[in-house]
């Protein structure tokens, strides 16, 4: 009988009293005090009759007589509180029980009946018979004195085996010692313990763990001393199980799909369910789950094979599993075949019978494992996401004696649905990443071009970020007159779009470099290209190919002058290692990133001594995960200072030390060591601005080629020199300079002060002129024009004879 301010479930504030056979009150709880206003010291040891309204006292006498027979009683009695008010009360009186020194006693519980309570006696009946609340009275020695039928059912121990015994004597699996400690605390302090929750097993259901909520109340005597404990217990297993499922699903959701790797995601599903849900978990995937192609629709007649992708067990090594990870499998729950994967729902087998024909006859090996390891319950759920069949997840129990229930099937289906989405995301990511990597590999240089003036080495690592590879690129470009172009760049973003944009910019750099543009001018043209590509993006962005921006550094090294001209667009400065190992980052002019427009680019010039090293890199090398850029540059300088290493080893060591693990961005490092041309490999002449000087020049050229051992090229070179000098004398202005370079090729240059570039014409049959440059083009591997601050230089390259190569 709960007071008006009691808890909603009625258990915490239940008014409880203990009455002897002659009507004397010997126990009085705080709930009784709240209901009637009397303190324990005022009523304990006194007759309880005055607490009953005068109209009901004769009725109470009949109730007491009935309870002495051992049947108990439930009904409505009007009680009188301390203020003299009559309070209709729903009362429950237990059958008589014996307490030491007091004789027969009765436990009286009740709660106030309010005027709006129209359901009458059925409320009290439901509380005592159908409500899941067990009640008991314990002596000061914590031995059972009385208990109701509900508590008897909870424990599965008959009443006669409980009376006079302690809880720990017959229910060790129910945290009995801890509960007795709480009751002792109530006896000692007189303070109730409310809603203590615990879990354990009972004889009523020994194969399932239950959760209980218990409240303990002291019973007090006339002197206020605690003379016993009354406790009430509710089975809250359903609520606890729902909470556990929610916690489990939250944990599983946090763990599933963390990796964008198909096999790792499959193993995550197996790991997350063992041992919290199953004792053995296997995840089998279709072979197509690892394919980089978009999976075709499955047909019953053309089902692909399956392989084991995830395995976990409570037993080390999972000896109960027939297949290991990576091995082919064909298991589907009987009596299904593999078409079950297409449209089947989850299968629940609460009890596995290894002796049944579907196991013993059709799958005897599995039946033998079921017997050996006591596998007794199974759930199997197809893995499907976005209309794509991925595989099958199977969960079994052995050491957990509780069979799977329908609620467990719902939980398994939810887990499988989440895992399937993670698997499909990983599959799609893998396919897109492989496509991006393939595209990127095809766009990046397969091998650095062989150049005379520089020894080069590089390392490139694609990003391990979830959004795929990035748009970093690098290149080594052979230019005219043995010069070498070095370029490194970084496109904003990741994935196929960034890789495709990188390819377009790399191609543009090749084209612009072939025009022999100086670095600053090349970046200006590249900036215009990025702006134009951005403007070509449709307004709605449907294609998703917008160029968001890029950084770039372009350098041109001349092995004759040993000068390196550089320009950068928002890119980190190069690292320059002097021959003595000193490392610096030159303070070069820095322009805006590509794609902003409106601001000019400037270049700077460095002299690279023989034995020095220059390093070009992208920000992924120095930034890493949460790393300070300045710290990254200092660490890069420390590594590059090791001058004794071969260039390939130094490049690999630098990346290994600065990027020890998976990185969120692409990493590119390009190292170059100058190999300047020797003075004996270069010769030049000042040519008078006179047609007669052409013949003398041919003689000097022939003499030099003979000294170089290139007599085989004398005739073609004389013709090239004649045509280039004659054109310069006819169309340009003096002074003129002729230069020969012997490197990987033989280069012939004619420089003048005119900025007008020659063009090759196709002369007609009767024309007397217009064939000079056409002949030059036929005799050389390539030719072109390079503008200089003084004018221009026309150059032509020839392959060396086989005997002179190297």
Image (spheres, grey):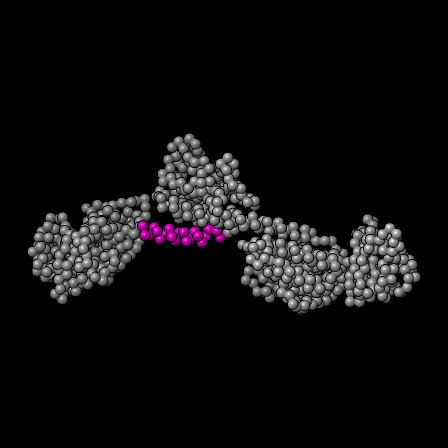
Residue in the picture at 59% in, 65% down: 629
Screen quadrant of the N terminus? bottom left
User: Is residue 237 shown left or right of residue 309?
Assistant: left
**Residue 146 image offset from top left, x and y in percent:** 18, 51
Which residue is at a point 29% across and 56% down the rendered structure image? 196
Taking the magenta stretch, the answer to whether it contains residue 246 is yes
Residue 574 image-quadrant placement: bottom right
Instruction: For residue 554, say whether it is visible.
Output: yes
Side of 543 relative to 82 (left or right): right
Q: Is residue 375 above or below residue 468?
A: above
| Nearest the eye: 282 or 388 | 388
Residue 660 x %, y %? 58, 56
Main SS type for the magenta part? helix
What residue do we see at 71% from left, 67% from top? 604
Q: Residue at x 80, y 63 (%)?
A: 756
Q: Which is nearer the eye, 624 or 712?
A: 712
Residue 494, x across and y down, in percent: 58, 56
Residue 788 occupies quadrant: bottom right
346 on left or right of 725: left
Q: Answer with the quarter of the image where residue 726 lies.
A: bottom right
Q: Is residue 291 magenta?
A: no
Q: Is residue 353 above or below residue 651?
A: above
Span shown in magenta: 238-258
């Amino acid at each position: 009988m709960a007071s008006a301010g009691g808890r909603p479930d009625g258990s915490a504030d239940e008014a409880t009293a203990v009455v002897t056979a002659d009507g004397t009150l010997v126990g009085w709880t705080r709930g009784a005090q709240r209901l009637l206003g009397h303190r324990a010291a005022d009523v304990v040891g006194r007759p309880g009759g005055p607490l009953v309204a005068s109209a009901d006292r004769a009725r109470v006498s009949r109730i007491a007589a009935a309870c002495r027979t051992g049947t108990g009683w439930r009904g409505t009695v009007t009680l009188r509180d301390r203020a003299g008010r009559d309070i209709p009360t729903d009362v429950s009186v237990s059958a008589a029980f014996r307490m030491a020194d007091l004789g027969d006693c009765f436990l009286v519980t009740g709660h106030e009946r309010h005027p709006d309570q129209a359901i009458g006696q059925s409320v009290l009946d439901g509380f005592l018979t159908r409500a899941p609340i067990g009640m008991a009275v314990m002596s000061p020695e914590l031995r059972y004195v009385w208990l109701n039928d509900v508590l008897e059912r909870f424990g599965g121990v008959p009443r006669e085996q409980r009376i006079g015994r302690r809880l720990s004597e017959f229910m060790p699996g129910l945290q009995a010692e801890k509960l007795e400690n709480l009751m002792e605390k109530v006896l000692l302090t007189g303070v109730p313990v409310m809603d203590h929750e615990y879990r354990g097993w009972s004889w009523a259901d020994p194969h399932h763990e239950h959760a209980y909520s218990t409240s303990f109340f002291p019973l007090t005597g006339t002197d206020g001393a605690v003379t016993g404990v009354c406790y009430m217990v509710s089975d809250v297993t359903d609520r606890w199980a729902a909470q556990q499922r929610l916690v489990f699903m939250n944990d599983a959701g946090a763990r599933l799909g963390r990796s964008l790797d198909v096999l790792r995601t499959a193993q995550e599903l197996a790991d997350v369910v063992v041992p919290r849900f199953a004792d053995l978990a296997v995840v089998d995937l279709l072979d197509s789950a690892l394919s980089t192609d978009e999976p075709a629709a499955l047909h019953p007649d053309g089902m692909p094979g399956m392989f084991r992708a995830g395995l976990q067990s409570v037993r080390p090594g999972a000896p109960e599993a027939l297949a290991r990870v990576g091995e082919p499998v064909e298991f589907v729950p009987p009596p299904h075949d593999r078409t079950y994967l297409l449209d089947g729902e989850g299968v629940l087998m609460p009890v596995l019978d290894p002796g049944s024909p579907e196991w013993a006859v059709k799958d005897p090996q599995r039946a033998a494992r079921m017997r050996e390891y006591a596998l007794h319950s199974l759930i199997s759920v197809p893995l499907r996401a976005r209309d794509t069949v991925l595989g099958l997840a199977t969960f079994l129990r052995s050491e957990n004696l509780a069979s799977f229930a329908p609620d467990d099937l719902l939980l398994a289906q939810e887990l499988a649905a989440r895992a399937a989405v993670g698997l499909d995301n990983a599959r799609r990511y893998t396919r897109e990443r492989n496509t991006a990597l393939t595209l990127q590999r095809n766009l990046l240089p397969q091998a650095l071009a062989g150049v005379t003036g520089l020894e080069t080495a590089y390392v490139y690592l694609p990003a391990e970020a979830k959004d795929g590879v990035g748009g970093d690129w690098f290149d080594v470009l052979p230019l005219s007159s043995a010069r070498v172009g070095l370029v490194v760049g970084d496109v904003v973003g990741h994935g196929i779009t960034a890789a495709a944009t990188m390819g377009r910019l790399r191609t543009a750099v090749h084209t612009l470099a072939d025009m022999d543009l100086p670095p600053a001018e090349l970046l200006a043209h590249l900036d215009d290209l990025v702006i134009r590509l951005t403007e070509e993006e449709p307004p709605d962005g449907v294609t998703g190919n917008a160029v968001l921006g890029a950084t770039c550094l372009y350098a041109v090294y001349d092995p004759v002058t040993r000068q390196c001209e550089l320009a950068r667009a928002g890119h980190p400065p190069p690292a320059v290692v002097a021959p003595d190992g000193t490392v610096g980052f030159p303070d070069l002019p820095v322009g805006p990133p590509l794609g902003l427009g409106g601001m000019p680019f400037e270049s700077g010039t460095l002299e690279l001594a023989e034995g020095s090293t220059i390093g070009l890199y992208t920000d992924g090398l120095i930034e890493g995960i949460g790393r300070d850029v300045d710290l990254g540059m200092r660490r890069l300088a420390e590594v590059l200072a090791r001058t004794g290493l071969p260039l390939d080893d130094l490049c690999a060591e630098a990346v290994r030390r600065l990027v020890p693990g998976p990185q969120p961005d692409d990493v590119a490092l390009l190292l170059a060591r100058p190999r300047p041309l020797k003075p004996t490999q270069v010769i030049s002449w000042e040519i008078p601005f006179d047609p007669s000087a052409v013949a003398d020049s041919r003689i000097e050229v022939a003499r030099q080629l003979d000294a170089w051992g290139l007599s085989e090229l004398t005739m073609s070179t004389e013709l090239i020199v004649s045509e280039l000098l004659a054109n310069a004398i006819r169309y340009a202005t003096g002074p003129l300079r002729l230069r020969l370079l012997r490197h990987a090729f033989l280069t012939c240059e004619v420089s003048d002060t005119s900025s007008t570039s020659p063009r090759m014409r196709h002369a007609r049959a009767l024309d007397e002129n217009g064939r000079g440059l056409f002949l030059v083009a036929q005799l050389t591997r390539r030719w072109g024009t390079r503008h200089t601050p003084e004018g221009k230089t026309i150059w032509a390259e020839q392959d060396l004879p086989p005997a002179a190569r190297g």
